[in-house]
C-alpha cells in the first residue's frame, strides 16, 4: 500500500505495533451532540489503514487545474447540500461522507430535489456485496463508491441508520477482537425486506484525484461538484476530547481545523485515528491564528501573530449539537487547513447520475438497467426508432488519430454510409483518450448540418467514452459521408481519437410526419451581476404545439472575462442543463450555438429560461440576446 502523504512522526507507529502495545487503533472518531467532547475511551475502535488502501501516491495523480487557471478567492456549493447528519458512536465517517457526496450529485442532476440515501445500507453493501473490509467497521471512499456504482443504494426510509454498533446483546459473536467477528457485527445485520425490494440508486464509477489545493479548488469550481477527502485524524487540530494536549472550545464551535503541531503529531501517533468529510468549497484568503502545542496563540520573533491562511469548507458527520455550531454556513460545517488536506488526506470523486434513466432506443445497450434493450423496453414505445420498426444499420472507424493541442482544426474521421434511407434516429459512440476532457469539443457533420455532441464538459476527468443520441439529422438522407471532429480547445494536454461509430435507424415510411423548424428569440438585454450565484435570467415562452425533435440555443454575451461565466438552460418546472461553464473564447464576446438533447421527445410548449452566472469578482458583462431553434413534429 502506498500512502498518499509524506512521512511524519505519526507514520512511525503503525496500527499493528500499537495493538502489541495494548493501544487501540481508531477511525472516524465522532463527537455527536454532547455538552462535553467524547473521551478517548468512548471513541469507536476501528482500523486506520482502510482509509488509504488502494490510494495512489499523490505525486502520480495529474492535477485537475490548468497552469494558467485563475481561481476565485471564495467558492462554495452550499446549494447542493442536504441536512447534516450524525454517524453516532460508529466508525462510519467515510460512509457518511460518501452518501453526502451522492446526495449532492443527485441534487446537482436536479431530478430528485431532496435525496436521502441510506448510510446503513451502504455500510452493508460495501462489506457484503462489495466484499471490502469485512473484518472491521472501517471503509474508504473507493470501496463505497464502487459499491454504489455496481450495486446501488436504497433510500433512508427503506433501512434507517442505527447510531450504535452491534454488540454481544445483538449477537454473542459481536465481541472480542474485530478480526474474529462476523461481518454482520459491522453492518448491524442484514437488510430488511423493504430494503431488499427497494429501488437502488447509482452513481458513475469514481476516481482518485490529486489532493493539492489548486487541484481540489479547480475540480470544485469547474465541475461544480464536491469532493470526499479522508485521512489522518489529529486530536488537537480537531479540538477533540481524546487529545492529551489543550484544545480550543472556540475553534470547535467555529468548526476550524488547523494544521497539526509537532506535539499533536507525536501525541496522535499513540492513538491512530482517521476521518473522512465532504469538501464543498474554499476561502483562499481566510486566516486563523495558529496555536502551539500548549494551545497558546503563536507569534513570531517580532510579536506578530502567526496565521494559517487558506481553508477548505467541509460538511462533517458529527451532527449539529457541538461541532461547528457557530460556523456561518450552519451547524455541523467546518473549515480545514488546506495544508492539512494536501499533506495528510486523499481525495475521491464521482459524477452526476444520469436521470431519469432513459433507454436510448437504437444503441443495443440496456441504458436504464431494467433488462430490456432498445425497442423491447417499454419506454421506447413512442420512439421513432421503434414506431417505424426499422432495420438497424451501423458502422465504425478506428482512426487512432492524434488530436492537435489547442487547435481549431482538431482531429477528423469520416464514415461513409452506403445504405439508402431517411434517418429516424441516430446514436454516435466515441472513444477518445485525453487527460483533461474539459478541453474537448466534439462535432458531427453530415449533409451540410453540424451537431455539437459535447462542448468542454468534464473538466479534469480522463478520457471521453460516451454514446450520444443525436436528433439533429432526423429525416435526413443517411447516405453519404459522416465526419466526426474532435477539437482540443486549450493548451498543455494532448489526446487521441481512438475510434467512433454510428448506428442509424432508418424510417420505413415517411418518418411519421413533417418536421417544422422555428426560431424563438428574447432580445431584451440585461447586465450580468458580478460574482453572484443567482446570475441573470431571461425567458422564452413557446406555445406552438408539437414534439421536440431537435433543439439548439444561440447566445450572445459580452463580458470582460468570459471564463468567469456559466450558462444554463432550464424549462420552468422541469429540468436544467449546463450549456457551457468557463468557456475558452478569445476577446470579450461569447456568441455560440449549443445543441441541447435533454428535451428531445418532450412536448414543445412551455417556458424556457436561460441563466448566465458570473462566478468570480471584478469583471462584468451583459446578456445581449438569446434564441432557440426548435424542430418539432
Image: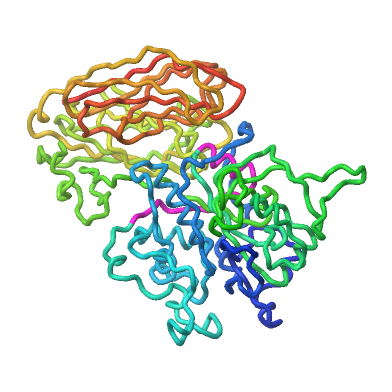
* Quarter holding residue 116: bottom left
Q: Residue at x 63, y 31 (%)?
A: 68
Is 609 within the magenta? no
Locate the C terminus and report the quarter of the image it occupies.
Answer: top left
From the viewer's perspective, tell me whether residue 129 is left or right of residue 325.
left
Number of numbered discs visible in the structure rendering: 0
Instruction: Say if residue 495 shows up in the picture.
Output: no
Question: Closer to the camera, 338 or 96?
Answer: 96
* Quarter holding residue 240: bottom right
Question: Closer to the camera, 81 or 360?
Answer: 81
**Residue 489, above or below 335:** above
Q: Position of residue 134 (x, y in %)?
A: 47, 74
Instruction: Say if residue 6 shows up in the picture.
Output: yes
From the viewer's perspective, tell me whether residue 169 is left or right of residue 50.
left
Q: Position of residue 332 (x, y in %)?
A: 56, 53
Question: Closer to the camera, 21 or 543?
Answer: 543
Q: Position of residue 102 (x, y in %)?
A: 43, 52
Q: Residue at x 46, y 39 (%)?
A: 458
**Residue 603, above or below 344:** above
* Quarter holding residue 596: top left
**Residue 463, above or below 119:** above
Is 216 within the magenta? yes
Return the residue found at the far left.
509
Question: Closer to the camera, 15 or 470?
Answer: 15
Q: Residue at x 92, y 42 (%)?
A: 302
Give the magenta range.
201-222
Q: Residue at x 52, y 26 (%)?
A: 614
Amino acid at each position: 500500500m502506498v500512502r498518499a502523504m509524506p512521512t511524519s512522526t505519526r507514520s512511525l507507529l503503525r496500527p499493528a505495533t500499537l495493538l502489541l502495545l495494548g493501544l487501540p487503533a481508531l477511525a472516524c472518531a465522532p463527537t455527536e451532540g454532547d455538552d462535553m467532547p467524547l473521551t478517548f475511551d468512548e471513541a469507536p475502535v476501528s482500523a486506520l489503514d482502510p482509509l488509504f488502501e488502494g490510494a495512489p501516491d499523490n505525486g502520480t495523480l495529474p492535477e485537475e487545474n490548468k497552469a494558467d487557471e485563475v481561481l476565485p478567492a471564495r467558492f462554495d456549493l452550499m446549494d447542493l447540500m442536504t441536512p447534516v447528519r450524525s454517524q453516532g458512536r460508529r466508525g462510519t465517517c467515510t460512509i457518511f461522507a460518501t452518501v453526502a457526496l451522492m446526495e449532492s450529485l443527485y441534487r446537482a442532476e436536479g431530478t430528485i430535489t431532496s435525496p436521502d440515501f441510506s448510510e446503513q445500507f451502504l455500510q452493508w453493501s460495501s462489506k457484503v456485496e462489495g466484499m471490502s473490509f469485512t473484518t472491521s467497521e472501517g471503509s474508504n471512499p473507493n470501496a463505497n463508491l464502487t459499491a454504489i456504482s455496481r450495486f446501488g443504494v436504497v433510500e433512508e426510509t427503506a433501512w434507517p441508520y442505527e447510531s450504535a454498533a452491534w454488540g454481544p446483546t445483538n449477537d454473542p459473536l459481536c465481541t472480542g477482537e474485530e478480526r474474529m467477528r462476523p461481518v454482520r457485527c459491522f453492518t448491524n445485520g442484514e437488510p430488511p425486506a423493504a430494503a431488499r425490494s427497494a429501488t437502488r440508486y447509482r452513481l458513475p464509477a469514481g476516481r482518485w484525484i490529486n489532493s493539492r489545493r489548486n487541484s481540489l479548488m479547480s475540480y470544485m469550481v469547474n465541475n461544480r461538484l464536491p469532493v470526499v477527502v479522508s485521512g489522518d485524524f489529529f486530536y488537537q487540530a480537531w479540538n477533540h476530547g481524546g487529545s492529551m494536549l489543550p484544545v480550543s472550545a472556540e475553534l470547535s464551535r467555529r468548526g476550524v481545523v488547523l494544521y497539526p503541531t509537532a506535539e499533536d503529531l507525536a501525541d496522535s501517533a499513540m492513538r491512530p485515528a482517521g476521518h473522512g468529510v465532504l469538501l464543498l468549497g474554499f476561502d483562499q484568503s481566510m486566516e486563523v491564528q495558529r496555536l502551539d502545542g500548549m494551545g497558546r496563540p503563536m507569534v513570531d520573533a517580532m510579536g506578530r501573530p502567526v496565521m494559517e491562511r487558506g481553508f477548505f469548507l467541509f460538511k462533517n458527520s458529527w451532527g449539529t449539537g457541538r461541532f461547528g455550531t457557530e460556523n456561518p454556513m450552519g451547524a455541523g460545517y467546518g473549515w480545514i487547513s488546506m495544508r492539512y488536506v494536501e499533506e495528510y488526506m486523499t481525495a475521491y470523486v464521482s459524477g452526476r447520475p444520469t436521470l431519469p434513466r432513459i433507454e436510448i432506443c437504437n444503441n443495443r445497450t440496456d441504458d436504464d438497467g431494467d433488462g430490456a434493450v432498445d425497442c423491447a423496453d417499454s419506454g421506447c414505445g413512442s420512439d421513432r426508432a421503434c414506431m417505424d420498426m426499422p432495420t438497424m444499420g451501423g458502422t465504425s472507424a478506428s482512426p487512432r488519430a492524434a488530436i492537435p493541442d489547442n487547435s481549431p482544426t482538431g482531429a477528423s474521421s469520416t464514415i461513409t454510409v452506403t445504405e439508402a434511407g431517411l434517418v429516424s434516429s441516430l446514436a454516435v459512440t466515441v472513444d477518445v483518450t485525453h487527460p483533461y476532457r474539459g478541453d474537448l469539443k466534439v462535432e458531427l457533420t453530415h449533409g451540410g448540418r453540424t451537431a455539437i455532441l459535447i462542448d468542454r464538459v468534464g473538466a479534469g476527468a480522463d478520457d471521453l467514452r460516451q454514446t450520444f443520441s443525436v436528433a439533429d439529422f432526423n429525416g435526413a438522407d443517411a447516405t453519404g459521408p459522416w465526419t466526426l471532429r474532435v477539437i482540443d480547445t486549450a493548451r498543455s494536454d494532448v489526446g487521441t481519437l481512438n475510434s467512433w461509430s454510428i448506428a442509424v435507424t432508418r424510417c420505413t415510411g415517411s418518418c411519421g410526419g413533417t418536421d417544422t423548424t422555428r426560431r424563438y428569440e428574447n432580445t431584451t438585454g440585461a447586465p450580468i451581476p458580478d460574482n453572484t450565484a443567482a446570475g441573470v435570467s431571461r425567458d422564452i415562452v413557446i406555445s406552438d404545439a408539437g414534439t421536440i425533435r431537435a433543439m439548439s440555443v444561440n447566445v450572445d454575451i459580452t463580458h470582460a472575462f468570459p471564463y468567469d461565466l456559466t450558462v444554463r438552460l432550464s424549462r420552468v418546472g422541469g429540468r436544467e442543463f449546463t450549456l457551457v461553464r468557463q468557456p475558452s473564447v478569445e476577446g470579450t464576446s461569447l456568441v455560440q450555438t449549443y445543441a441541447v438533447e435533454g428535451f428531445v421527445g418532450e412536448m414543445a410548449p412551455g417556458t424556457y429560461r436561460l441563466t448566465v452566472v458570473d462566478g468570480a469578482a471584478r469583471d462584468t458583462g451583459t446578456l445581449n440576446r438569446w434564441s432557440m431553434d426548435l424542430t418539432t413534429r
